[in-house]
Amino acid sequence: MFNYNLIIEYEGTNFVGWQKQKKGKSIQHEVEKALRKIFKVKINLVGSGRTDAGVHALGQSAHFIVKNKIENYYKVKNSLNYFLNKKKIVITDIKLKSESFHARFDAVERVYEYKIINRDAPLCLDKNRAWHIKKNLDLVKIKKGLKILKGIKDFSTFRASSCQAKSPLRKLLKAEVKKHNNLVTITFSSKAFLQQQVRSMVGCLKYLADGRWQIKQFQKVAKSQKRSLCAPPAPATGLYLKKVIY
């Protein structure tokens, strides 16, 4: 048996998310269909984690196990992309891994980016690919908020009510913001995130950056462990799974 790792890029706008569901198109299902056409057997694709409806990926990671060894990686990758490209899904890499490799459980770090276009004019090229915020955002305040979020903490405030994680404790390894022209990019990295954690943190940072909250209130909300005090989560359109590190 051979265990292969796929790196997958996709636009999540028209999908119900990564994971297969009874209703709606999922990324996982579409990639499995393409793999089945090539290998002529049913394929079970295991992702590094779920991305919600509308969330994008620059480097989602997944693995699958088959009996047949891939002799020509270039040909297989091109064939997969032939079936997937029109669906706005692209396989950027295929690698042979050990039989024990697991895309989800072996991950040591997941990196997410959240993109905001901060300008008056409506979006054109970035529509459905970033959060459009007209009101000017204070990056100094965002940096202060990110400093509060970093480290090992109870992130219950930022956890969706439907989250099934056993513990709300997470270690936020990286939390930083950069701005280039009108594009504000906030980067987070952790071994694992709670459901809607990133979008909820960004929603609260927006309240801080546009003056709705002061830093003391942001800090109070973050420490409260009360979901009811959280700002509305940022839209899925601006969130990207950038890469998974093993």
Image: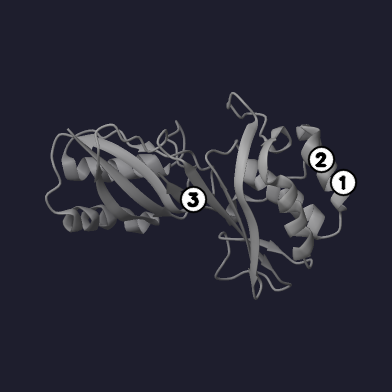
Q: Which of the two labelled residues, at mark 2 and mark 3, occupies the earlier sequence position?
A: 3
| Quadrant that contains the C terminus | top left
Task: Give 18 or 192, whichever is nearer the viewer.
Answer: 192
Q: Nearer the viewer, mark 1 or mark 3?
A: 1
Q: Residue at x 46, y 41 (%)?
A: 108
Q: Nearer the viewer, mark 2 or mark 3?
A: 2
Residue annotated with mark 1: 217
The circle drawn on residue 221 is 2
Residue 233 visible in the shown view: no
Give the class, few, some or many, for how many residues have Cα within 10 Å of label 2's Cα (few <14, many ≥20): some
Residue annotated with mark 3: 14
Q: Residue at x 71, y 32 (%)?
A: 156
How many angstroms separate mark 2 from mark 3 (CA)?
33 Å
Image quarter of residue 1: top left
Residues marked 1 and 2 touching at CB (< 8 Å): yes
Amino acid type, label 1: Gln
Task: Give 157 or 35, whichever is nearer the viewer.
Answer: 157
User: Does residue 88 appear left or right of residue 66 in this picture?
Assistant: right
Image quarter of residue 153: top right
What sort of colour scheme is used for the picture? one colour
Circle 1 SS class: helix
User: Does residue 29 appear left or right of residue 172 in this picture?
Assistant: left
